[in-house]
Each structure stands twice: as C-alpha cells, then as structure tokens.
Amino acid sequence: MTEMRNLRSTDFNKAARGSNPSRSLSFPSYGAALREVSQGDSHTRAKGGEDRSYSEAKAKAYRMLSHRDRTSHEIAMKLKEKGFSEEIVSTVVAKLKEVGALNDKRFAEHWMRYQVENRHLGPLRLKMTLLEKGFSAPEVARLLERLSEEWDPVYVARRALLKRYKELTRLQDLRLRRKAFAFLQRKGFSTENIQMAFRNSDVIGRGR
C-alpha cells in the first residue's frame, strides 16, 4: 500500500489540466433514506396531498437510486428528459439531498476510488467524466487533489499495463509498445505518466 501513496499531491491535477468534458460503481442501497422520501414531506403537506407530477418524479428518482448511487445532476437530467418541470425536478432533488439519498461529495469520492482501483483510470478520464456528471471545474480540481494523496498515477498506469499485457517484457517490441501507449492515453494518463510507467517497468531505458 505504501507504493500507492508515494505521489506528490500536485501530480493528478497537473496531468488533468487542459482536458475537455467528453457503468459506474454500484453502491449499497439507501433504502432507509429513500423510504423517507416516499413518505409525506413539506411539499405534500403544503398541497394537502401529493401533486401527481411530483409523485411520479419522486417515484422515478427512487427507482433510479435503488439501482445505484447517482449525482444530483444525473437525477435532474433524467427527470427533465422524462418531461418534468424545472420546479418539480428542483423540489425532488432538494428532498433527496435533505434526507441524504443524494450526496455528491460521497458519490465522487467512492466513484473515483472504484475507477482507479478496478478500472485503472488516469486523471484525465476521471476529470472528463466528473465534468460530465455535473461537477464544476474547481470541484473536480479539489477532488483530484485529494485523490492524489492516495494514488500515484504512474503506479496506476503500470497496473493497467500488467492487467492487459501480463508480461511487461512483451513491450520491448516497439509496435506493441505504441499500442500500449495509446491504450494508456485512452485510460486517461498523460504522456509524462506513461513514459514514467514504461521506465519503471524497464520497458525503455532510464535515460531515454
């Protein structure tokens, strides 16, 4: 584990700068919180009974979250796609946040760790996807900064190579090494991270 923590805290953000926005981790059920959403709330009391659109939107959000955790942006976009008004969507999202069924910070931290540990994604892919999920650029920068305290992108890149190629001595072949380079770029690693991963694996000379 110590090898995973040898990253200087700026490396992930340094690699992530300049990228553009372009099935994620399933989390434990938030049944208790979601059940609270399905019960009476301030919106229904004010109306003297659930508004039909609000009820339908809340039910759809419940079903989405029962399968996996999502960001508030994802829930809002899905509900808008289904034709619900801005007011209804905002009310439902606010209620989900209130009871803890939606928590963007929790989602981001768990999602990033899963992507790094299981899919071996680099900072560029993480940044791109988080932006797509509705996080702002400053929020993404802070999230990557915290992640950089746990994970070295060079180490993660090397793990991605080992998973794909098994024997890294195979990458002594120049043509195969070019394919490996493109593979790591798609995973979201910078050129510098990829070259360092090759050097650390004795694929290319230390002085090259």
Image: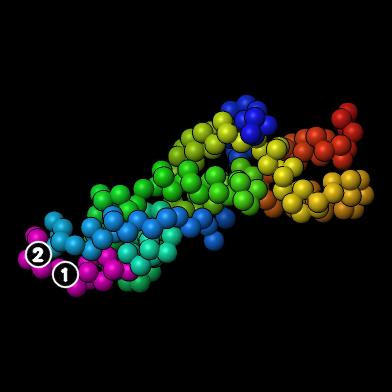
Residue 52: image quadrant is bottom left
38 vs 130, left or right, is left
- Place of residue 64 in the rendered image (x, y in percent of width and height, measured from the top left): 38, 65
> In this picture, which residue range is highlighted in magenta?
45-60
* Magenta span main SS: helix
Residue at the image point whose x is 32% and y is 64% from the top: 62
Question: Residue 68 shows which numbered tag?
Answer: none
- Graded by Cα atoms within 10 Å as few (under 14), some (14 to 19) or many (20 or more), the crowding at tag 1 reads few
Residue at the image point whose x is 38% and y is 63% from the top: 66
Q: Amino acid at mark 2?
A: Lys
Residue 4: image quadrant is top right
- Graded by Cα atoms within 10 Å as few (under 14), some (14 to 19) or many (20 or more), the crowding at tag 2 reads few
Circle 2/circle 1 CB separation < 8 Å: yes
- Place of residue 28 in the rendered image (x, y in percent of width and height, measured from the top left): 42, 55
Q: Amino acid at mark 1?
A: Asp
- Which part of the image, by quadrant, shows the N terminus? top right
Residue at the image point whose x is 32% and y is 59% from the top: 31
- Place of residue 137 in the rendered image (x, y in percent of width and height, measured from the top left): 48, 41
Q: Which residue is mark 1?
A: 51
Q: Which residue is mark 2?
A: 47
17 vs 189, left or right, is left
- Place of residue 92 in the rendered image (x, y in percent of width and height, measured from the top left): 26, 59
